[in-house]
Image (tube, grey):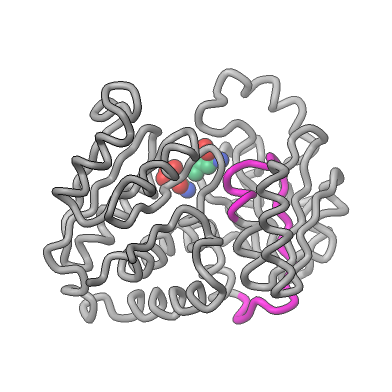
């Protein structure tokens, strides 16, 4: 049966750990996997902008011996120029996998339901699972373990926060989301992560004080205050979120050896200051690089014949 990757929760704990082992091996020895997906084509559907996701999937599939096909926001217009069903039924005849970045999460879910080929979520308004996989691979590289760690996500309870909660739940990492009132993670996303966390004992919690959230954290994570599609709210959100800025003062509440993470793009001076994102404890470019390795492993797991 074909497998999709729409959520971190689509993978079991064992599958995630196997994915990380594979990613680490691919990172160590790129040539060894140069024919792993030989001749296979991955279509990349983008309805929002991207630097990292586009580059890492495009380069990643080629490093595995395959091809990529970039379909820009103006190209398909999922559900507008043509129905999601019809697009899925066309593409499955010509390519062996599809990565989709779009707005509504229902679009990727429906696409995956209709298509007989693997579908990868490259970010929706609801989640960003490939980001969380790269992030937890990065955490593993820097901390050498997951057990007993605390990650505090400071800011908007958005798509990135949802996927970090899922990854923490599967891997036994405690995740605290520190956000302003009214900007909590989606209730269903929180419940799904909490349910999954029962198997590993991870604690998933939401607080409204950044200092309380960051206290004792091994990882401090933030993301933009206005996500793609929320540009009109940016000014209003800046006022609300300013007390949640990750700056050197806030970092003092974390563990002495805490690392700082951000999925990027960053709005320097808003959610994070230069002194934090450029500090020696910032691992943001390791995360960006690990998008490549983590997604190569995911593509291999889903598309290998
Ligand atoms: N982090 C991330 O997904 O970056 P892009 O939006 O540039 O792809
Ligand atoms: N929350 C951000 C993540 C970008 C990678 C957004 O959706 O725009």
Looking at the picture, tell me which residue is in the foreground, 281 or 90: 90
- Snapshot quadrant of residue 176: bottom right
Which residue shows up at 46% across the image and 53% down it?
Answer: 6
Q: In which quarter of the image is residue 96?
A: bottom left
Nearer to us in this view, 174 or 287:
174
Which quadrant of the picture is home to ligand 1?
A: top left
Q: Which residue is drawn at 33% across and 49% down?
A: 99
120 displayed left or right of 146:
left
Front residue of this view, candidates 14 and 137: 14
Q: Which residues lie in the magenta part?
A: 143-163
Q: Indicate the position of residue 305 as horizontal and vertical percent values.
A: 22, 72
Q: Quadrant of the N terminus?
A: bottom left
**Above/below status of 182 relative to 139:** above
User: Does residue 69 appear left or right of residue 279 in this picture?
Assistant: left
Query: Is 117 placed above or below 224 here?
Result: below
The residue under the point 23% across, 29% down is 75
Q: Can you say whether 203 is above or below 29 in the image?
A: above
At a point 20% along the width and 68% down the height, the residue shown is 37
The picture places residue 200, in percent across and down from the top left corner, at 70, 75
Quarter of the image holding residue 252? bottom right
Q: Can residue 186 be seen in this view?
A: yes
Question: Residue 240 appears at what percent x and percent y?
Answer: 77, 28
In the rendered structure, the answer to whether residue 17 lies left or right of residue 34 reads: right
Q: Nearer the viewer, residue 165 or 281?
A: 165
Above or below, 164 against 46 in this view is below
**Residue 293's x, y, as percent?**
37, 67
């Amino acid at each position: 049966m074909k497998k999709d990757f729409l959520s971190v929760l689509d993978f079991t704990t064992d599958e995630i750990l196997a994915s990380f082992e594979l990613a680490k091996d691919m990172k160590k020895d790129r040539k060894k996997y140069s024919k792993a997906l030989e001749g296979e084509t991955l279509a990349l559907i983008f309805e929002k902008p991207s630097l990292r996701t586009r580059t890492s999937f495009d380069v990643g599939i080629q490093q595995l011996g395959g091809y990529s096909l970039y379909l820009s926001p103006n190209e398909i217009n999922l559900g507008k120029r043509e129905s999601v069903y019809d697009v899925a039924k066309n593409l499955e005849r010509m390519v062996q996998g599809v990565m989709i970045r779009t707005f509504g999460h229902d679009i990727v879910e429906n696409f995956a339901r209709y298509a007989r080929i693997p579908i990868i979520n490259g970010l929706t308004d609801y989640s960003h699972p490939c980001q969380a996989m790269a992030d937890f691979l990065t955490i593993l590289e820097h901390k050498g373990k997951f057990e007993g760690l605390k990650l505090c996500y400071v800011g908007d309870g958005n798509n990135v926060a949802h996927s970090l909660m899922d990854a923490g739940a599967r891997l036994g990492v405690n995740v605290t989301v520190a956000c302003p009132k009214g900007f909590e993670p989606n209730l269903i996303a929180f419940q799904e992560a909490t349910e999954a966390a029962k198997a590993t004992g991870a604690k998933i919690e939401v607080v409204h004080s950044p200092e309380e959230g960051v206290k004792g954290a091994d990882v401090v994570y933030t993301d933009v205050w206005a996500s793609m599609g929320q540009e009109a709210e940016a000014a209003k959100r800046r006022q609300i979120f300013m007390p949640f800025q990750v700056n050197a003062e806030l970092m003092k509440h974390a563990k002495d050896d805490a690392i700082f993470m951000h999925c990027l793009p960053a709005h320097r001076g808003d959610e994070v200051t230069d002194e934090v994102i450029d500090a020696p404890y910032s691992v943001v470019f390791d995360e960006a690089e690990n998008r490549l390795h983590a997604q190569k492993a995911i593509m291999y797991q889903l598309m290998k014949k």
